[in-house]
Image (spheres, helix red, strand yellow):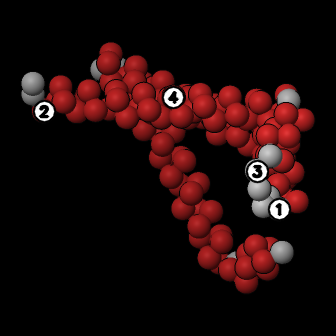
Amino acid sequence: MGCFTFLKAMMFVFNGIIFLAGIGILGVGIWVKVDSGSVLSFLGKIENVPPEISQVLNVGYLLIAIGALLVVIGFLGCCGAVRESKCMLLLFFLIVLLVFIAEVAGAVVILAFQPLAANLFAK
């Protein structure tokens, strides 16, 4: 097995894991938005849960968006690796690059407004 065959297999495996994680996050997000009563009853069975745990219901749309993005990234990475499609791999790279840039920009904003962020997180 050559080096490129190994890299292709590893890219398929890692993107397959990303795809499965995206499906899981997407499923939890849909579950939170569709059946919030059962989510609250499930969380209520856990001991020492703070009352603010009900705020979990507000992140349902965020979980759906993140899960969908991970599914798309995982699909493009898997199919691009197996088919050796330059278009799919380029689109995969561009999406991962945009996510990375957004993360760096978010970190810079938090560092620039550190006192404001500390006040928000302290509440």
Mark 1 nearby-residue class (10 Å; few <14, some 14–19, many ≥20): few
Residue where numbered disc 1 is placed: 50
Look at the numbered disc 3 and give the secondary structure of its residue.
loop
Q: Position of residue 19 (x, y in %)?
A: 50, 29
Tag shown at residue 3 = 2
Q: Position of residue 56 (x, y in %)?
A: 80, 49
Mark 2 nearby-residue class (10 Å; few <14, some 14–19, many ≥20): few
The quarter of the image holding the N terminus is top left
* Mark 1 or mark 4, earlier in chain: 4
- What whole-number distance in Å separates the C-alpha atoms at marks 2 and 1? 51 Å
- What whole-number distance in Å separates the C-alpha atoms at marks 4 and 2? 26 Å
For the residue marked with disc 1, what is the amino acid?
Pro
Q: Is residue 19 left or right of residue 61?
A: left
Q: Nearer the viewer, mark 1 or mark 4?
A: 1
Q: Is residue 114 left or right of residue 101?
A: right
* Mark 2 or mark 1, earlier in chain: 2
Look at the numbered disc 4 and give the secondary structure of its residue.
helix
Identify which residue is drawn at 34% across, 29% down: 13
Look at the numbered disc 2 and give the secondary structure of its residue.
helix
Mark 4 nearby-residue class (10 Å; few <14, some 14–19, many ≥20): some
Comparing 121 with 69, the one in front is: 121
For the residue marked with disc 3, what is the amino acid?
Ile
Identify which residue is drawn at 73% across, 35% down: 29
For the residue marked with disc 2, what is the amino acid?
Cys
- What whole-number distance in Å separates the C-alpha atoms at marks 3 and 2? 48 Å
Residue where numbered disc 3 is placed: 46
